[in-house]
Image (spheres, coloured by chain):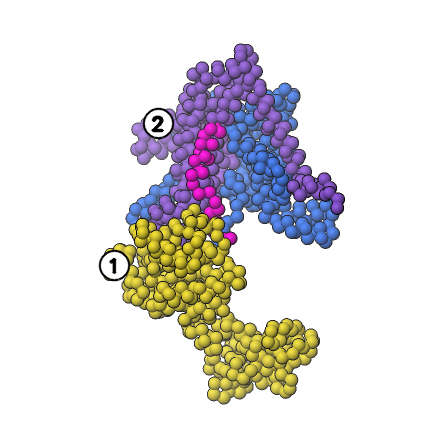
C-alpha cells in the first residue's frame, strides 16, 4: 500500500491502533471477568480470586434447571432455523429470479423488521400471541423469533441466488430435468453453501435474541439468554459466581455455533450482507 | 390469431410458478409483522378508559413517560456518533491489513454474545472492585473507585461494547468495497493522504456511513436489557423500551404498551429518515470501480 | 525523505527531458521476490513496454516507479535525482489503471481536472487544459457525464486524459486495454501511440500481450520471475530472442528436443528420430549437448519428401493464406506447423523448419 511517512501520520496511526487495542483489551477483560468469577471461591477486593473451584457450575446447573433450559433453547433455535430456512430460501429464490409488479414493496416488507426496534413490533405481536393463547408457549417463542430471522435469511440468500447463473437451470431443463430433479440435483447443491451460512447465522442470532423471546417466554419456554437475564436481574438472590457460571455455559453454547459458522462465513457477514469484493 | 392465454400474459409480467414461491414467506410476514402492527395501532387507540387518543395524551403529559424519549436519544445518539467516529479511522487502517480475520473474529464476539451477557460481564468488570477501576487507580487516572454501573455510563459502556464492533464491521465492508486503485489514482495525481480521504473516500463512503449510522442507531435506540441491568431503570436510563415493557407486561395495559411501542417506532423512523434523506445530497452509485 | 536538489515544489520535477533510471530494483513480499534486481534506463520520450506473463513482476515494477509500492532495495532516479523515497503524490507521474479507477462520484470534467486541482490550477487555465486533454482523446462531448454513464472505451479515454492533463514527465499504463473488447483494443492501441507522439512524455506500458508490445513500443522489456530476460526493439525480440522463454512469448510455439549432432558457424543441427533439423544457435552449443529447437508454426513446414521430422496429423484449420495444423510426434510431443493443403487426420507428415527461422537453445537443466 501507499506509504506515508510524516511524523503526524505516525502519531495518528499509533493513536488509531491504541484505541483499537484498548477496545479489544476491555472487551476481553469483560469476557475474562465472567469466566474468572465463575471459577472463583471468593473474589472481593482483590485482582484475582482467592481460590478456584468448579462447584458453581454444578450448583448453577441445578439451581437454574439448566438441563431443561438448554434443551428448550435448542428446540426453539432449531425450529426457528428450519422454518425460516424453508420459507426464507423459497422466498429469496422467487425474489432473486423474478421481477413482478409490487416486488419492491415485498422487499421493503422484509427489510423493515431489521430497521424497527424489536420491542416496537414485539409488544403488539406478543399481545396478539397472548390472546391466541400462545403466550408463554414453545410455539409462541418460535413464532416471535421468525419475525427477524425470516427476513435475515431472505436478505442473505437473495444476493447468493442472484450470483448463480440462471442459465444453469435452463441447461438442466434442456437436458431433461423435471422440476423435482432440477431442485434436488442442481439447485440444492448450488444453494447449499449459502443456505448453510445463512442458517448458521440465524442460529447464532436466535440463541442471543433476548428482547423478543423475553416478551413471550413462560416458565417452560425460557431460553438460556432469558434465564440469564432473570438471574442477573435478581442478582442479590443467588451467588454471583453461580450466575457467571451460567453465563459461561451460555457463552460456550453460542461460541460453539459461532465457530462452526465462521468455517463458512466471513465474520463481517454476521452484521453485513454478503458482498463480492472488487476484482483487482 | 388467438389472444395469448392468461397464463402467458401473467408470465410476461413476471407472475408464474416461481413467483408463487414468495407466498409462504410473505404470508408469515403479513401474519406476524403487518397484522400485529395494525392490531397494535388499533389497540393503542382503544385505551382502557378515556377518549381514543388518551394513551398518547397520557404519555405526552406525564414527564415520567415523555422524558424516556429524551433519555433514550441522550444515550443512543452520542453512542452511535462515538461508535461511528471510532469505526471509520480504524476501518481505514484495518483495510490495509492482510490478515483481518483474527481481529474481525474477536470483534464479532460481543455481537454474538448479546447485550445480556455483556451487561453481566460489565457489572463485574466496571464494578467498584472490578479490573477497570483497579487499572485506572493503578495508573493514577482515578483517585478512588468511580461508580460506573447502575448509571448512565454503565449503559453507555455496554452500548459501545456491542455497538462499536457492529459499526466497525459494517464500515469495513463499505471501505473494502472501494476499489483500491481509486485511491492510488488520486495519489499519482498529487493528492495527499488527507486530500485522498476528504475528496475521494469520504464522498464515496457517505451513503454507506449513513446506512451504518441508521443500523447502529436502531440498535442503540432499542436498548433494553442493559438499561435495566447496568443502568438505573427508574432514573436516568429509563429508556422508552422500559416504559413500553412496563406498561404492557407489568401494568398489564397492552393498549398503553402498544401506544408507547408506536411512539418508539415513530421517533426512531423520523431520525432514520432524516439521516437517509440527507444522503441524497451525495453520490449514491457503485463504488467498486467503474467497469462497464 | 526529501530530495537533495528539490524543495518539494510540485513543478520541480523536470519536464520532458528527464531520463529515468532503475538501478537494481528489488521488491519482496515476505520471502517471495517479486522484483529481483531490475536495471533499466529509459530515455526521455521513449515508449517502453514491460512484457511478461502474469506474476512476472511487471506490474510490481510499474507500481514501484509510481510510488505505490516501496522498494526493498535499489534506486529510482529521474534526471539524476533519487525519487524512490518520494510519496506517489509528489512524483507527478500520470498513471492509467487496468480498472480505469475513475472517481465514480465526479463528472468527467472533475475527474480529468483532479490532478490540476491538486496542483492548485483552477479557473480558466484548468478549463482550457481539461478541454485540451479531452480533445486529445476525442471525448469533448461527454464532459459533464459521470463515469458510470460511459462505455468501457470512453472510461478508458477519460482515464488517459486524466493522466496526461497534468503534463507528467512519465505516463505509466498498467494493462490499460485488457478490459476492452478486441476491436476497441486495436483502435485504442493506435490512439495511445498517437497521444504518446503528440505529448512527448515518456511512456511505460505494462502488458502481457506481445502483439500490443510489438506494435506500440520503441523498446520492449521482457520479464520473467522478477528479472529482465531481454531488452530490445520489437524487431530484435521478434527475430532474435536470447532466451527460450522469450522465444516462447514471441510465438515460437513448437519446441523439439534433441542432441546436437553438427555445428557450423551460427547454425547447428539436432537429431530427432533420425532426422536432422537445423536452426540458429542463440546460445553456444557443442556436439552432444542436449538442445531445444524452437520454431513458429508458420516456419515449421510440412514437406512432401525426404528429410524432416515424422509426425501424425491431429487436426488442421484453414486460416486464410495457409493451413495450420497440430501434429503429434513419436514421443508424443505436440508440433504446430504450416501446410499448403488440408491433410486428413491421422495422415503422416514430415516437418522441416524453414531455413534460418528456427532457434536453438540449451535444454533447461542440461
**Chain of the residue on which disc 2 is drawn:** B
Coordinates of residue A165 in the picture (x, y in percent): 62, 50
Chain identifier, colour yellow:
C
Region in magenta: B268-292
Coordinates of residue C344 in the picture (x, y in percent): 69, 76
Single out the residue that lies furthest toward the front: B1
**Which hue is chain B drawn in?**
purple
Q: Nearer the viewer, residue A41 or C28?
A: C28
The residue under label 1 is C6
Magenta stretch contains residue A32: no
Coordinates of residue C131 in the picture (x, y in percent): 37, 55
**Which hue is chain A drawn in?**
blue
Residue C48: quadrant of the picture: bottom left
Say which of marks 2 and 1 sits in front. 1
**Chain of the residue on which disc 1 is drawn:** C
Q: Residue at x 63, y 42 (%)?
A: A98
Coordinates of residue A163 in the picture (x, y in percent): 59, 48
The residue under label 2 is B145
Label 2, label 1: how many angstroms apart (C-alpha)? 57 Å
Tell me how many marks there are: 2
Q: Residue at x 53, y 12 (%)?
A: B51
SS assignment at label 1: loop
Amino acid at each position: 500500500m501507499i506509504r506515508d511517512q510524516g511524523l503526524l501520520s505516525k502519531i495518528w496511526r499509533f493513536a488509531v491502533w491504541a484505541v483499537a487495542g484498548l477496545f479489544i483489551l476491555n472487551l476481553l477483560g469483560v469476557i475474562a471477568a465472567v469466566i474468572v468469577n465463575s471459577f472463583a471461591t471468593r473474589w472481593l477486593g482483590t485482582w484475582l480470586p482467592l481460590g478456584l473451584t468448579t462447584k458453581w457450575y454444578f450448583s448453577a446447573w441445578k439451581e437454574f434447571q439448566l438441563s431443561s433450559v438448554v434443551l428448550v433453547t435448542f428446540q426453539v433455535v432449531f425450529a426457528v432455523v428450519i422454518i425460516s430456512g424453508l420459507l426464507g430460501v423459497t422466498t429469496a429464490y422467487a425474489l432473486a429470479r423474478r421481477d413482478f409488479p409490487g416486488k419492491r414493496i415485498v422487499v421493503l416488507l422484509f427489510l423493515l423488521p431489521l430497521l424497527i426496534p424489536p420491542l416496537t413490533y414485539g409488544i403488539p405481536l406478543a399481545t396478539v400471541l397472548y390472546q391466541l393463547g400462545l403466550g408463554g408457549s414453545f410455539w409462541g417463542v418460535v413464532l416471535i423469533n421468525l419475525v427477524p430471522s425470516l427476513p435475515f435469511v431472505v436478505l442473505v440468500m437473495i444476493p447468493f441466488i442472484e450470483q448463480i447463473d440462471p442459465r444453469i437451470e435452463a441447461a438442466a431443463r434442456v437436458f431433461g430435468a423435471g422440476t423435482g430433479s432440477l431442485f434436488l440435483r442442481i439447485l440444492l447443491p448450488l444453494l447449499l453453501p449459502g443456505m448453510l451460512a445463512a442458517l448458521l447465522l440465524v442460529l447464532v442470532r436466535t440463541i442471543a435474541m433476548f428482547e423478543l423471546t423475553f416478551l413471550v417466554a413462560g416458565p417452560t419456554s425460557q431460553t438460556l439468554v432469558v434465564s440469564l437475564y432473570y438471574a442477573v436481574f435478581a442478582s442479590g438472590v443467588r451467588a454471583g459466581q453461580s450466575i457467571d457460571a451460567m453465563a459461561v455455559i451460555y457463552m460456550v453454547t453460542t461460541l460453539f455455533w459461532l465457530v462452526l459458522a465462521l468455517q463458512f462465513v466471513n465474520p463481517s457477514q454476521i452484521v453485513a450482507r454478503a458482498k463480492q469484493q472488487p476484482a483487482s | 390469431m388467438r389472444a395469448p392465454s392468461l397464463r402467458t400474459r401473467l408470465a410476461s409480467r413476471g407472475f408464474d410458478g416461481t413467483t408463487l414461491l414468495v407466498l409462504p414467506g410473505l404470508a408469515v410476514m403479513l401474519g406476524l409483522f403487518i397484522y400485529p402492527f395494525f392490531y397494535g395501532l388499533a389497540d393503542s387507540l382503544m385505551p382502557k378508559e378515556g377518549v381514543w387518543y388518551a394513551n398518547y395524551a397520557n404519555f405526552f403529559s406525564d414527564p415520567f413517560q415523555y422524558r424516556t424519549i429524551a433519555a433514550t436519544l441522550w444515550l443512543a445518539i452520542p453512542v452511535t456518533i462515538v461508535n461511528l467516529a471510532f469505526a471509520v479511522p480504524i476501518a481505514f487502517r484495518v483495510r490495509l491489513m492482510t490478515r483481518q480475520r483474527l481481529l474481525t473474529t474477536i470483534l464479532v464476539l460481543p455481537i454474538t454474545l448479546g447485550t445480556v451477557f455483556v451487561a453481566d460481564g460489565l457489572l463485574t468488570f466496571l464494578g467498584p472492585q472490578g479490573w477497570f477501576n483497579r487499572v485506572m487507580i493503578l495508573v493514577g487516572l482515578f483517585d478512588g473507585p468511580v461508580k460506573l454501573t447502575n448509571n448512565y455510563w454503565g449503559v453507555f459502556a455496554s452500548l459501545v461494547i456491542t455497538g462499536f464492533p457492529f459499526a466497525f464491521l459494517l464500515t469495513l465492508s463499505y471501505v473494502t468495497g472501494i476499489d483500491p486503485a481509486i485511491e492510488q489514482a488520486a495519489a499519482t495525481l498529487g493528492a495527499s493522504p488527507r486530500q485522498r480521504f476528504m475528496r475521494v473516500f469520504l464522498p464515496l463512503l457517505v451513503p454507506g456511513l449513513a446506512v451504518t449510522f441508521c443500523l447502529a442507531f436502531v440498535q442503540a435506540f432499542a436498548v433494553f436489557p442493559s438499561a435495566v441491568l447496568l443502568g438505573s431503570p427508574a432514573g436516568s436510563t429509563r429508556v422508552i423500551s422500559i416504559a413500553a415493557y412496563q406498561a404492557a407486561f407489568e401494568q398489564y395495559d397492552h393498549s398503553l404498551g402498544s401506544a408507547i411501542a408506536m411512539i418508539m417506532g415513530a421517533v426512531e423512523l423520523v431520525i432514520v429518515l432524516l439521516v437517509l434523506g440527507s444522503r441524497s445530497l451525495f453520490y449514491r452509485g457503485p463504488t467498486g470501480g467503474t467497469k462497464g | 525523505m526529501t530530495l537533495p536538489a528539490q524543495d518539494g515544489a510540485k513543478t520541480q520535477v523536470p519536464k520532458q527531458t528527464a531520463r529515468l533510471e532503475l538501478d537494481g530494483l528489488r521488491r519482496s513480499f515476505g520471502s517471495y521476490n517479486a522484483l529481483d534486481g531490475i536495471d533499466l534506463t529509459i530515455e526521455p520520450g521513449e515508449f517502453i513496454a514491460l512484457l511478461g506473463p502474469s506474476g512476472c513482476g511487471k506490474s510490481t515494477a510499474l507500481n514501484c516507479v509510481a510510488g505505490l509500492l516501496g522498494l526493498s532495495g535499489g534506486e529510482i532516479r529521474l534526471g539524476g535525482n533519487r525519487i524512490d523515497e518520494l510519496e506517489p503524490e509528489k512524483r507527478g507521474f500520470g498513471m492509467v489503471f487496468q480498472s480505469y479507477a475513475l472517481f465514480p462520484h465526479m463528472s468527467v470534467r472533475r475527474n480529468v481536472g483532479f490532478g490540476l486541482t491538486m496542483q492548485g490550477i483552477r479557473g480558466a487555465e484548468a478549463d482550457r487544459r481539461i478541454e485540451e486533454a479531452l480533445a486529445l482523446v476525442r471525448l469533448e462531448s461527454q464532459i459533464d457525464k459521470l463515469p458510470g454513464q460511459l462505455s468501457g472505451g470512453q472510461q478508458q479515454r477519460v482515464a488517459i486524459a486524466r493522466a496526461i492533463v497534468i503534463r507528467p514527465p512519465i505516463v505509466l499504463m498498467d494493462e490499460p486495454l485488457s478490459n476492452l473488447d478486441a476491436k476497441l483494443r486495436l483502435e485504442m492501441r493506435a490512439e495511445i501511440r498517437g497521444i504518446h507522439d503528440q505529448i512527448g512524455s515518456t511512456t511505460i506500458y505494462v502488458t502481457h500481450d506481445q502483439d500490443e508490445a510489438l506494435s506500440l513500443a520503441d523498446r520492449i522489456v521482457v520479464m520473467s520471475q522478477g528479472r529482465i530476460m531481454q531488452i530490445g526493439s520489437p524487431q530484435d525480440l521478434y527475430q532474435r530472442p536470447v532466451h527460450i522463454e522469450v522465444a516462447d512469448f514471441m510465438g515460437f510455439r513448437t519446441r523439439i528436443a534433441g542432441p546436437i549432432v553438427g555445428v557450423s558457424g551460427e547454425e547447428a543441427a539436432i537429431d530427432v528420430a533420425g532426422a536432422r533439423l537445423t536452426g540458429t544457435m542463440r546460445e553456444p552449443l557443442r556436439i552432444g549437448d542436449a538442445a531445444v529447437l524452437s520454431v513458429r508454426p508458420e516456419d515449421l513446414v510440412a514437406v512432401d519428401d525426404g528429410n524432416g521430422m515424422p509426425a501424425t496429423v491431429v487436426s488442421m484449420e484453414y486460416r486464410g493464406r495457409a493451413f495450420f495444423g497440430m501434429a503429434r510426434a513419436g514421443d508424443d510431443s505436440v508440433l504446430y506447423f504450416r501446410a499448403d493443403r488440408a491433410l486428413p487426420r491421422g495422415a503422416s507428415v514430415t516437418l522441416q523448419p524453414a531455413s534460418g527461422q528456427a532457434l536453438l537453445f540449451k535444454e533447461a537443466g542440461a
